[in-house]
Image (cartoon, grey):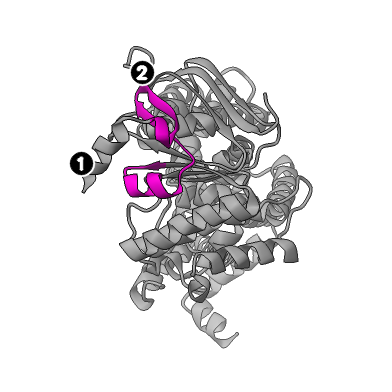
Amino acid sequence: MSSLNALLNVFDEESLLIFRMMLKNPLVKNALLVGALVSLCTALLGVILVLKHYALIGHGLGEVGFAAMSVASLIGLQAYPLAVAIPIVCLSSILIMRINQKSGMGGDVLIGIFSTSALAVGVLASAYTSGYSGVYDSMFGSLYAIKQTDVVFSVSLSVAVILIFLFLYNRLFSVTYDETYARATDMNADLYQFLISLLTSVSIVLGMRVMGAMMISSFIIFPAITAKRIARSFRSMLLIAVAVALFSFFVGMAISLLVVSPNLPTGACVVSVSVIVMLATFLFTKVKR
Amino acid sequence: MKENVLVNVKDVSMNYGSGRQDAVEHVSLDVRKGEILALVGSNGSGKSTLMKGILKLMPITCGEIERKKGLRTSYLAQIHTTERDFPANVREIVLSGTRLGRFTPFYGAKHRKKAQEAMKLLDITDLAKTNIGALSGGQLQRTLLARAIAGDPELLILDEPCSALDPAITHDLYHLFSRLRDEKGVSVIIATHDWDFVREHADRVLVLDRHVEYFGDLSGWSGMEAEHTCHH
């Protein structure tokens, strides 16, 4: 408690007053809830994606989400951004994984193709609607974009992700460690891959509203990489990743709310905290054996 | 399909993309219950490709592969695509080879017992809590083999399983494969370049050079003596 007070003393009275008022704001409360739930989901999914070398998919899908929302505005569906973005991002995610599997083109190349194409479409669509301020909000997130629908989606998503990780833990372990072996023993690896793609896509669309399209991949990568450094088992890697993600989110969010001038984007604050946690972990721990 | 046959491969060809030369051309064979079938051939002769076809890891371009309904297969690949710094220990990896029922989410005492037995067979019980990143190549190979055996397979498909192992361990493993066949009725398909193994342990041999050069009992393979001479 004293350390929290010491931290808060850095900020002046006015900042603290605004901070306390903001915490009572329903929009900020929603953003906190959605952000925390999405952090939890992406941390769990990120462990699988990082171990399977699909870590950059979050970056690619974030930009596909941005394009989908920009196009939704262009065609007059701005009131239903999730209804437009979620199916498009899910489809892209499944396409990336399937094409990668069938063509052997390489996940990095495919993610590059999808993300840059989507970025171009999104920027062009935004030029006709909200202009570049809209692009900025989509890219770096805005607390005030969170609506009640996002809250409902986030709670549903978290329940689904937690249940899947709880009841399919052993199967997810097998498919993540050695997909070829899993297939050779008649395990339905495609089903688990499909589930992971679907849940990742929904998490990214929800998370990008708080964090922004540019920053959402950090939710997937940093907690998992930090956890991989110290975890000795798959289970502990999942738990550490969740702890790192939630810590980074709440600290980053608090900083973005406390610093009134300049107005710091939440996404960038959360990513900065994640980077510091990761660097500290790498500096102060030995590689596990 | 006959009762004692697990897999029937009929006139199968396979390739790595349309327009490319077939890696396997018009191959036919059957795998019987409780036999060791040795796949022999030089590098690039199609041994690994044929194994992937039988395991449904790769599509076939023509022909047909018939498998016994519900056949339990296990596999040891020649090249491991697994990550060395994956956060898991030997016990967890071996346990992951046991089979969960369709509606069974968690491993029980039965699965743990099978994993324990497989580790004992492969003499890696003392490595149970070792992180897989700390294993030598040979220890990892034995761990993956234990995982394959823990799955209680009817058909064990092994792609050059002893290539990373020293002669003493190789000798022990060859006897282990024979024991699995004799005591548990497991069928083993094994790709190998070791004619001593073929002579001492295999029931039948398939000599492959993309197409079948010979398939049958060892006594009928006229090239064996030449191969044997060549290796000594």
Q: Image point 64% across, 60% down: which residue?
A: A22
Q: Quadrant of residue A208?
A: top right
| Magenta-span inclusion, residue B196 | yes
Q: Where residue A64 appears, x then y in whole percent?
A: 49, 31
Q: Image point 45% across, 53% down: which residue?
A: A221
Q: Nearer the viewer, residue B29 or A184?
A: B29
Q: Dot 1, how many residues are within 10 Å of its Cα: few (below 14), some (14-19), or many (20+)?
A: few
Amino acid carrying label 1: it is Cys
Q: Where residue B6 appears, x then y in whole percent?
A: 62, 33
Q: Up-down: is B41 above or below A286?
A: above
Q: Up-down: is B93 above or below B206?
A: below
| Magenta-span inclusion, residue B229 | no
Any mark on residue B230, and which? 1
Q: Is residue B97 visible?
A: no
Any mark on residue B22, and which? 2
Magenta span of residues: B191-220
- Mark 2 and mark 1: span between their CA atoms? 28 Å
